[in-house]
Image (tube, helix red, strand yellow):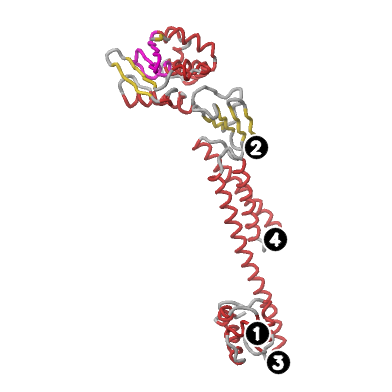
Amino acid sequence: MDIVKIGKFIAEKRKEKKLTQEQLAEKIGVTSKTISRWENGNYMPDISLLKPLSEELGITLNDLISGEKVDKEHYQEKLEENIINTIDYTNKKVYEKNKIIAEILMMFGLGLTFTAFTIFPSESSWGSIYSILGLIISLIGFSKLNKKKSYIKRLFLNLGYFALGLIILLGIDYANVKLNNIAPRFSYLIKTSDDMIVYKAPLCNVYRINRNTKNEYYIIDTKKIYTEDTIPVTPFNRNKAGIDNIIKFKNQYIGNNSNDSHLIDSLPLSEYGYTFEIDSENLGLTINYHITDWYINENQYLEKCLLYNTVSIFSLIDNVQEITFNFSSNSYKVNRKQVENLYPNYTDIISSEINKDNFNKYLENKMNDNEFVKDIFNKIFIEV
């Protein structure tokens, strides 16, 4: 179907009828701009307008579609050709229209999917709902693009597209969990207790411990080896204060201000602000916390922090001999000999190099035992 030839034929017949573009447009219910587009060969008239247009121009449909007057000898042959061309053209226009709709659906669906990751917090179920909804919308668009394929091919393509989209979503979610320490969006089970939330997701289990406190931390269990009973639980932010982080600050000598500062900053109580001083002559360390001691002592939090900080500092700074912890009302003093002699299994923690497993077993885990904390604290600390 030659739309340029048809356009010229329309212009020619309009002029023979002594009609302006505006007049012809008014007669068939379109705009003069539409007539201009037809005559310039930019567009083909809509199939519903072919009959009224041909009547106004005084020609047959066969003439109009041919773009010329068809003589009687070739009329039937041309008619059959034009019918086929019209069907092909109509199918092409329908396909192009469906393709545009399909592409819009795909873009809208994918946009909705990935926007849901930024709008809704990870704990909100709406994020996962809108993500899946967006994937389904984009799947409808993808399916429209493959309408010409056989049913079996369409089925496999659609299933593959949805599966790939789901894998990508789960992958992005997992990357977010790993990089940003947040709850997974696509959790199929969530368990909540007083101080812990467990998110069970397809690629990992995530434990949110000390939730809604300053010491909230996440443990991402990709191998799914933990349970609520075996997961390492500590009253501190384990990601910050745990041995896996603080071991990098191990040093032979006190006085490396940068190293000492980083270590103290990683340990519990640093969240309240502090300054520190070094006594090079007596190899002592004084930490001044900007908080009143009794104010933070719910559930023996003060004793747990001081005990944990003391053993950590003596384990990681080889030559420090004494530590003083100052608060706005009281001070607490401890020396290395007291810890070596009175803290159970201290030598197992520091044997040759720091033993991480023993550190967690004999220090971190013991912070959950209130009786142990009270007993050892009273033995090794002097209130001054």
- Which amino acid, by three-letter code, is at mark 3? Glu
Q: In 3D space, how far apart are the residues under numbered discs 4 and 2 (Cα atoms)?
A: 35 Å
Residue that numbered label 4 is attached to: 150
Q: Name the mark nearer the viewer: 4 or 1.
A: 1
> Label 1: how many residues lie within 10 Å, few (<14), some (14-19) or many (20+)?
many
- Which amino acid, by three-letter code, is at mark 1? Leu
Disc 4, SS: loop
Q: Residue 188: give its label.
A: 2
Task: Decide which of tag 4 and tag 1 comes sooner along the chain.
Answer: 1
Q: In 3D space, how far apart are the residues under numbered discs 2 and 3 (Cα atoms)?
A: 74 Å
> Label 4: how many residues lie within 10 Å, few (<14), some (14-19) or many (20+)?
few
Q: Residue 64: give its label.
A: 1
Which segment is the magenta one?
310-337
- Which amino acid, by three-letter code, is at mark 4? Ser
> Label 3: how many residues lie within 10 Å, few (<14), some (14-19) or many (20+)?
few
- Which amino acid, by three-letter code, is at mark 2? Tyr
State the residue in front, 25 or 235: 25
Disc 2, SS: loop
Task: Decide which of tag 1 and tag 3 comes sooner along the chain.
Answer: 1
Is residue 1 found left or right of 329 in the rendered image? Answer: right
Q: Is residue 329 visible?
A: yes
Q: Are marks 1 and 2 in contact (CB under 8 Å)?
A: no
Is residue 379 found left or right of 231 in the rendered image? Answer: left
